[in-house]
Image: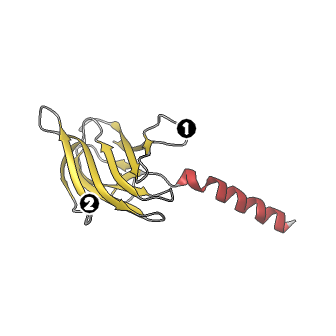
Amino acid sequence: MLNRFMSAALLLLLSSAPALAHATVKTELGSSESALAAYEVYRLNVPTEKAVATTAVRVLIPQGLTVSRFLVQPGFTRTVKTNEAGLITEVTWQGRIAPQEFGRFYLQAHNPAAPTSLVWKVYQTYADGSVVAWDNTEVGYPASVVTVR
């Protein structure tokens, strides 16, 4: 009886593991909440979930968030897109995250002054040309959300 229970628990754990490993954005300290109008460091965590390397990570900056700087990520080049006001709207890091590894990218930003949910849409490109969209467009591929209050 105990062996059946342990086998069932292990099967459940293994079958749910891919759903737990996805691109996430949290505060530097790992929270999904941040303060109104605060200056915050956000971290983007991106695991490689395929047998080929991740070669690019693109994140859309949530509306109302003002990005001011980035932590240097050795081995990666960073490009940004800005709007007509000069605010950063998108960031792409290009480099290599091997299978069974993860990359972590940091950015500093000023939070909105009004309560909101920051929805982080992340697009992960693999060496085989495939792109995984962590943007809520497909079940099992959620965008990260940080609540500002």
Coloring scheme used: secondary structure
Query: x and y percent of residue 37 in the render?
Result: 22, 44
From the viewer's side, name the closer residue of 26 and 95: 95
Query: x and y percent of residue 32 in the render?
Result: 40, 50
- Residue identified by numbered label 1: 139
| SS at mark 2 in the image | loop
Q: Furthest residue to the left?
A: 85
Mark nearer the N terminus (1 vs 2): 2
Nearer to us: label 1 or label 2: 2
Q: Is residue 3 above or below residue 55?
A: below
From the viewer's side, name the closer residue of 120 and 132: 132
> What's the amino acid at mark 2?
Phe
Please tell me in which quadrant of the rendered image residue 48 appears.
Answer: bottom left
Determine if residue 64 is in view.
yes
Look at 65% across and 59% down and name the residue there. Answer: 14
| SS at mark 1 in the image | loop
Question: Mark 1 packing: few (<14 Cα in 10 Å), some, or many (20+)?
Answer: few
Label disc, if present, on residue 59 of the rendered structure = none
- Residue identified by numbered label 2: 76
Q: How far apart are labels 1 and 2 at the CA level?
A: 30 Å
> What's the amino acid at mark 1?
Val
Query: x and y percent of residue 92 in the render?
Result: 27, 48
Tag 1–tag 2 contact (CB < 8 Å): no
Say left or right for 8 vs 82.
right
Look at 32% across and 36% down and name the residue there. Answer: 115
